[in-house]
Image (cartoon, rainbow, N blue to C red):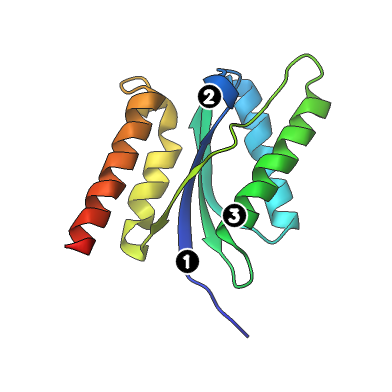
Amino acid sequence: MPHSTVYLHYVWSTKYRNPILLPSVKEVLVKHIKSNAFKHKIHIVSINGHLDHLHCLVRLKAGQTIDGVIKLIKGESARWFNEYYKNLQLVWQADYFVASVNRSGLERVTRYIEQQEKHHARVSFEEEYQAIIKHHKDFEERVED
């Protein structure tokens, strides 16, 4: 029986960075995403976000793909949200960011995800996203050297 210990940190935003994920709305959406992920055997370690984006730490199981997991989460959550909240519309941006997380980084990434409200009181999503991209590009360049 295959066993997987691959952890992935996904980040995705609402289309046009629409700030629709107010705390009460985000809480209901996150609860639904967790429930639906469980039904599809997607192991979510942590999920949280701020007004216009979500972070999700997932343990990828054998047979699951990076793209398949996020497509299921984003697609189903938008459909559900738009049926549940008749007066709001959620559209996710097509793109997303994903990076692997090693076991030694799990606690740090989990804490970071759980503290999104506090974090974004100091740093905008755009600043955060650019820093994440730069960090990973710098890492890839060091590995290639």
The image quadrant of residue 121 is top left
Q: Secondary structure at mark 3?
A: helix
Of label 1 and label 2, which has the lower sequence position? 1
Q: Which mark is nearer the camera, 3 or 2?
A: 3
Marks 1 and 2 sit apart, C-alpha to C-alpha, by: 27 Å
Compared with residue 106, is residue 12 higher up or lower down, i.e. above or below? Answer: above
Toward the bottom, the furthest residue is 1
Q: Looking at the image, which residue is at 71% across and 38% down? A: 77
Is residue 106 placed above or below 5 in the rendered structure? above
Task: Estimate the x, y position of residue 99 in percent, counting from the top left.
Answer: 41, 53
Residue at which label 3 appears: 67
Q: Which residue is mark 1?
A: 6
Q: Residue at x 78, y 34 (%)?
A: 79
Left or right of residue 92: residue 125: left
Tell me which numbered mark, 1 or 3, is placed earlier along the sequence. Answer: 1
Label disc, if present, on residue 47 of the rendered structure: none
